[in-house]
Amino acid sequence: MKAKEIIARRVALEFHDGDVVNLGFGIPNASADFIPDGVNVVLQAENGALRFGPTPGKHNYHPNTANSGGAPITLMPGASTFDIQTSFAIIRGGHVDATVLGALEVSQDASIANWIIPGKFAPGMGGAMDLLVGAKRVIVALQHTDKTGESKILKECSLPLSAKGVVSMVITDLAVFEFQDGKYLLKEVAPGVTVEEVIAKTAGDVIVDKDVKTMPI
């Protein structure tokens, strides 16, 4: 299983009945394809949709419905679409139970950097900053290391922050972390991955939970 699919599948297990969940572009949006059977979650796209589902096929694709990354979506029964002002009123009004966002870096004080690398072109921060302070729960989904093998799970972010101290959970292709006492709390490891490997590839300080589990993906 590829790294991005591991993350998307694990993210989907955090969805609960009745939750309004905003999905960022990339891996977070991919999690819509792996929602467990029987879980009735209301997915929000910040560009103006509520209650969308998995990626459509050729038989049910509609060119006028897309998620925050511009990829096609399936509108489920009872879905609604609206302007972006209404969408951000939902976010800023505290009506989003959880948001799932990608990141460039996270730090052990639960901060996140996910919008710019200085000196490189960036299209803008989008709705990330609104979501990070407006959602009741923030789940970060990212690959554990970059293309050179350097950890993205840091003691302190080196890139400009999107928000400080707001992250609830970090899900990577190797592990699931929460936070405790200003450090990462290792809760789960991916199938075939050891605790020692996770610690070796994590630049931040790690507390190992006394009951570390294998990701149920």
Image: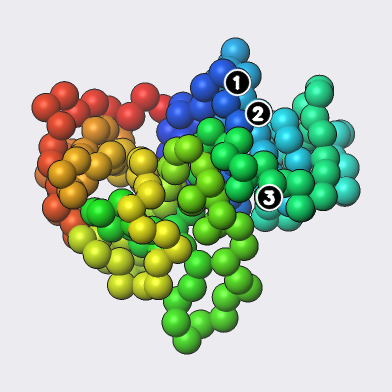
Element marked by disc 2: strand
Real-space Cα distance between discs 2 and 1?
A: 6 Å
Q: Quarter-wise, where is residue 78 in the image?
A: top right
Which residue appears at 88% of the width and 48% of the height?
Answer: 64
The residue where tag 3 is placed is: 88
Element marked by disc 1: loop
Q: Nearer the viewer, residue 185 or 32?
A: 185
Which residue appears at 28% of the width and 39% of the height?
Answer: 178
Q: Tell me, for residue 42, which label it has, or none.
A: 2
Residue 56 is left or right of residue 137, and the answer is right
Disc with the residue nearer the chain's start (3 vs 1):
1
Q: Nearer the viewer, residue 73 or 24?
A: 24
Q: Badge 3: how crowded within 10 Å, few (<14), some, or many (20+)?
A: some
Percent position of residue 84, x then y: 76, 52
Instruction: Please state which of the two labelled residues, at mark 3 or mark 2, is closer to the viewer.
Output: 3
Quarter of the image with the N terminus in it? top left
Disc with the residue nearer the chain's start (3 vs 2):
2
Q: Tell me, for residue 18, which label it has, or none.
A: 1
Specify whether residue 36 is in view: yes
Residue 186 is left or right of residue 167, and the answer is left
Labelled pair 2, 1 in contact (Cβ < 8 Å)? yes
Q: Quarter-wise, where is residue 123 in the image?
A: bottom right
Q: Identify the amino acid type marked 3.
A: Phe
Disc with the residue nearer the chain's start (2 vs 1):
1
